[in-house]
Image (spheres, helix red, strand yellow):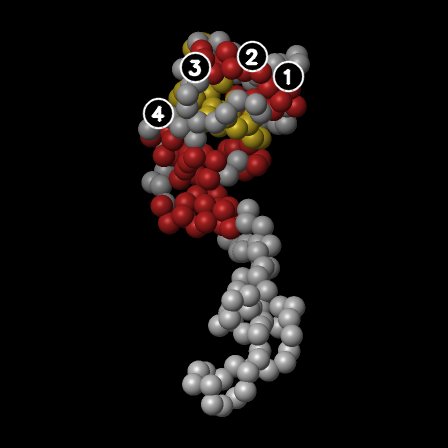
Amino acid sequence: MEVKVLDNKGKATSAKVNLSDSIYAIEPNDHAIYLDVKQYLANNRQGTHKSKERAEIVGSTRKIKKQKGTGTARAGSIKSPVFRGGGRVFGPRPRNYSFKLNVKLKRLARKSALSYKANSDSLMVLEDLNFDAPKTAQFKSLMGDLNLSNQKVLLVLGSANDNVFRSARNIPNTKVVTADSLNTYDVLHANKVLLSQSSVEVIEKILN
């Protein structure tokens, strides 16, 4: 699959990039995508939720009323879950939500997501961006030239570039990642995926 390379002004250049069919033109596997996105969201959960159960409530331990003759149910503690201010039954406890997925399945999920984007013409290849300094206006101008000002954009770089990261971080609905940290959720969440020229080779090396 040949794709034209766009310059920093959003115009097509004479250069072309060959995108591997084994990554960008496979039959997408929806279940692999589901599992990978589920793992990504689960791994991002803090898992620090906690509520107090009856053993952790501060309160008196005396029996609050006599056992028999009151006409109501017996009660031995004010910390019982049936009373206001009592402990919670089976409340949440701190836990780790992460789980394991095989590397081959995660690769298949990323290939499927990229194939979806390629099939819907939501994939573009740009020349490598070289900003002399962090300039939000320059990055915003690039998005305007590409007609992506009001869309969710994912820019994939071949390697870390601090100036590009800083130029994009204040622009809403725009995310910049490196090719080695590309994940299925980010690809699917974006309306347009912009691949820098250098990132194409890195992605093929990782996924193949």
| Front residue of this view, candidates 15 and 195 | 195
Image x and y of residue 11, in percent: 44, 9
The answer to whether the residues at label 1 and label 3 have Cβ atoms under 8 Å apart is no
Residue sticking out furthest to the front:
70
| Front residue of this view, candidates 111 and 22 | 111
Q: Which residue is mark 1?
A: 134
Q: Earlier in the sequence, mark 4 or mark 2?
A: 4
| Front residue of this view, candidates 194 and 175 | 175
Q: CA distance from mark 3 to mark 2?
A: 14 Å
Q: Residue at x 49, y 90 (%)?
A: 68
Q: Earlier in the sequence, mark 4 or mark 3?
A: 4
Q: Which residue is mark 4?
A: 121
Q: Earlier in the sequence, mark 3 or mark 2?
A: 2
Closer mark to the observer between disc 3 and disc 2:
2
Q: CA distance from mark 1 to mark 3?
A: 20 Å
Amino acid type, residue under disc 3 in the picture: Leu
Q: Residues within 10 Å of mark 1 (few under 14, many from 20)?
A: some
The answer to whether the residues at label 4 and label 2 have Cβ atoms under 8 Å apart is no
Q: CA distance from mark 1 to mark 4?
A: 30 Å
Q: Residue 113: name its quadrant.
A: top left
Image x and y of residue 123, in percent: 41, 25
Q: CA distance from mark 4 to mark 2?
A: 27 Å
Q: Which residue is mark 3?
A: 146
The answer to whether residue 129 shows anywhere in this view is yes
Q: Which residue is mark 2?
A: 137
Q: Is residue 153 left or right of residue 30?
A: right
Q: Please tell me whether mark 4 sits on a helix, a strand or a loop.
A: loop
Q: Earlier in the sequence, mark 1 or mark 3?
A: 1
